Amino acid sequence: MREVGCKPKYLKVLAFALALPLLGCAETEADAVDDIGIRPRVEQSRDIRADAQLAQTHKLPILLAFTTDYCDYCEQLEEDFLQPMLISGQYQDKILIRKVVVDASYRFTDFDGNATYTDQFANRYKVRLYPTVLFLDSQGNELAERMVGINTPEFYGGYLDQNIDTALNRVRGHNQLNP
């Protein structure tokens, strides 16, 4: 009796051949681009005083992500959460998003206008693990619970949104509770 059907290796070749045209078309949310075809990056702050003035003008809190170049979780934070927030446009009236790359140790202007280095600035906030996300007002005060690391990615976006809402409410005077 003769077998009917494809042998497994032929199925694999057929599946690959059918999927090949789609490989270049698959786009994740992190791969999305803005209206002019550029994938937005989280802006690296070099002058937090200028960022604070911008935030104060628009009555926004600042999401400040402390990252390092060698940290896979820092990359995950940016690609899976912060970039999609920028792409969506739903956060531009809620929060100013910036990052500080600590291991690069570049010159940095702090909230008081003083020159410092990124690692020294991180030490002022007692940032020891990366990524650490702070929610700050225009004077550098923490408005919501800081987020250290990413230990539950499936819930991280919800926690991030909750802290953004808390920080925004505090900046706009809607909630005077302590963080």
Image (cartoon, rainbow, N blue to C red):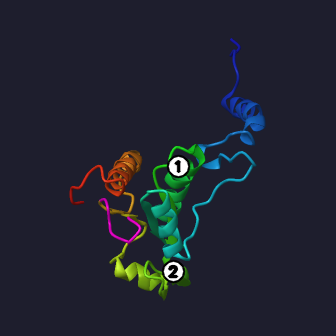
Dot 2 falls on a residue whose secondary structure is helix
Residue 107 lies, with reference to residue 20, above or below; the image says below
Q: Are marks 2 and 1 in contact (CB under 8 Å)?
A: no
Three-letter code for the amino acid on which mark 2 is drawn: Asp
Q: Which residue is mark 2?
A: 103
Q: Position of residue 96 (x, y in %)?
A: 49, 59
Q: Residue furthest left?
A: 177
Which quadrant is the C terminus positioned in? bottom left
Q: Say if residue 18 shows up in the picture.
A: yes
Q: Position of residue 102 (x, y in %)?
A: 49, 78
Asked whether residue 39 is drawn in magenta, I would say no
Asked whether residue 141 is drawn in magenta, I would say yes
Magenta segment boundaries in residue numbering = 137-144
Three-letter code for the amino acid on which mark 1 is drawn: Met
Circle 1 residues within 10 Å: few <14, some 14–19, many ≥20: many
Q: For this view, does 32 lie left or right of residue 168?
A: right
Q: CA distance from mark 2 to mark 1?
A: 25 Å
Q: Say if residue 68 shows up in the picture.
A: no
Q: Which residue is mark 1?
A: 85
Which quadrant is the N terminus positioned in? top right
Q: Residue furthest top?
A: 1
Q: For this view, does 138 lie left or right of residue 145?
A: right
The mark nearer the N terminus, 2 or 1, is 1
Q: For this view, does 85 lie left or right of residue 130?
A: right
Circle 2 residues within 10 Å: few <14, some 14–19, many ≥20: few
Measuring 29% from the left and 60% from the top, which residue is drawn there?
A: 145
Q: Nearer the viewer, residue 93 or 126?
A: 93
Q: How many marks?
A: 2
